[in-house]
Amino acid sequence: MQIHELKKLNKTKTKKRVGRGGKRGTFSGRGSKGQMARGARLGADFRGGNAPLWKLFPKKRGSNKKVEIKHRSFNVKQLKPEIINLGRINDMFSEGDLVNPRTLNEKKVTRSKIAKIKLLGDGELVKKLIFSGITFSGQAREKVLKSGSEIK
């Protein structure tokens, strides 16, 4: 077999050529008038004619002189940790078990594998368990240590 004999597994989809009359009527599926009807291709930084975001902020020289950007378009959403109460863990696990994000996910306590987990102090912990990879509220930490459990 030679390179010119190779065939594609999936057919390439041909791009629809719009704006040339035919069965699509007068406007050819582009709507009437306006920027997009006239064949514009807008870039990712286009904000309706306003200055692009990268032009809004001052530039400073050097890699260690970054400007803190406070703008609604740059709000990075941080993942909030999944919250679990101590009472629920007390019901789910038996004496001496390891409690970490993976075991909580296996027991279907958490929704996702990558979520951070925070333990709150609602409920009582009677069993001695081993906790790792979990953050605690102040009250939860006291109750866990009081029950004789171990935090790694």
Image: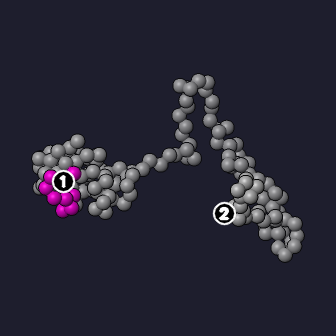
The image quadrant of residue 1 is: bottom right
Q: Is residue 143 visible?
A: no
Q: Quadrant of the C terminus?
A: top left
Looking at the image, residue 148 lies above or below residue 67: below
Q: In screen coordinates, is 92 left or right of 41?
A: left
Looking at the image, residue 57 lies above or below residue 44: above
Q: Which residues are magenta?
A: 89-98
Horizontal and vertical percent position of residue 135: 28, 46
Q: Circle 1 — which element?
A: loop
Looking at the image, residue 69 lies above or below residue 10: above
Residue under the point 84% across and 75% down = 23
Q: Check disc 1 and report the residue beneath it.
A: 97
Q: Check disc 2 and report the residue beneath it.
A: 9
Instruction: Name the kind of residue labelled 1 in the image.
Output: Asp
Q: Earlier in the sequence, mark 1 or mark 2?
A: 2
Q: In screen coordinates, is 1 left or right of 128?
A: right
Residue under the point 87% across and 66% down = 20
Q: Is residue 102 visible?
A: yes
Callout in the foreground (1, 2): 2
